[in-house]
Amino acid sequence: MDHKTRCLAGTNHCNVLQCSCGMLHVTLGPITMRVDPRAAGTLHAVLGEALDRLTIEASTSRDAAPAARPAVAEAGKPAPLLRLASSRGDDLPS
């Protein structure tokens, strides 16, 4: 089968392509994952829930003012760059 893709959404650091085989190709920096669209829906829901929780925690913190949802850039400012993190945590500052 000859696979052809079309871009559904993207930025300089992240994009989602739809393949003629039905899979989504999700690219974050140098990593591309082939994802079933149903699994992508679950990923979207889980990431949204996590980002909402971070927003709630930040807005209820004594030291933090209410914040916008982290995934959304402020008007006129570029979105933050994506960073792939090690699951071992060995990329964190000591």
Image: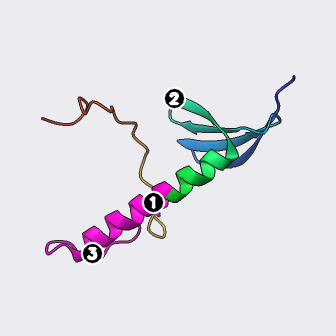
Q: Position of residue 66 (x, y in %)?
A: 29, 77
Residue 35 picture quarter: top right
Is residue 10 visible in the rendered structure shown here?
no
Give the Cα distance between marks 3 and 1: 15 Å
Circle 3 crowding by C-alpha within 10 Å: few under 14, some 14–19, many from 20? some
Q: Position of residue 60 (x, y in %)?
A: 23, 76
In this rendering, position of residue 42 left or right of residue 78: right
* Region rendered in magenta: 46-72
The answer to which of 71 and 33 lies nearer the viewer is 33
In this rendering, position of residue 38 left or right of residue 60: right
- Residue drawn at x 40%, y 59% is 50
- Residue drawn at x 67%, y 41% is 36
Q: Amino acid at mark 1?
A: Ala
Query: Helix, strand or loop at disc 3?
Result: helix
Residue 14 picture quarter: top right
Q: Amino acid at mark 2?
A: Pro
Q: Is residue 41 above or below residue 31?
A: below
Q: Position of residue 44 (x, y in %)?
A: 55, 55
Q: Position of residue 15 (x, y in %)?
A: 61, 43
Is residue 5 visible in the rendered structure shown here?
yes
Q: Is residue 71 above or below residue 81?
A: below
- Residue drawn at x 32%, y 33% is 87
Circle 2 crowding by C-alpha within 10 Å: few under 14, some 14–19, many from 20? few
Mark sitting on residue 48:
none
Task: Look at mark 1 in the image and give the residue it sits on.
Answer: 71
Q: Quadrant of the C terminus?
A: top left
Give the Cα distance between marks 2 and 1: 20 Å
Task: Look at mark 2 in the image and give the residue it sits on.
Answer: 30
Q: Hey, which residue is sitting farthest top in the picture?
A: 1
Task: Look at mark 3 in the image and give the residue it sits on.
Answer: 59
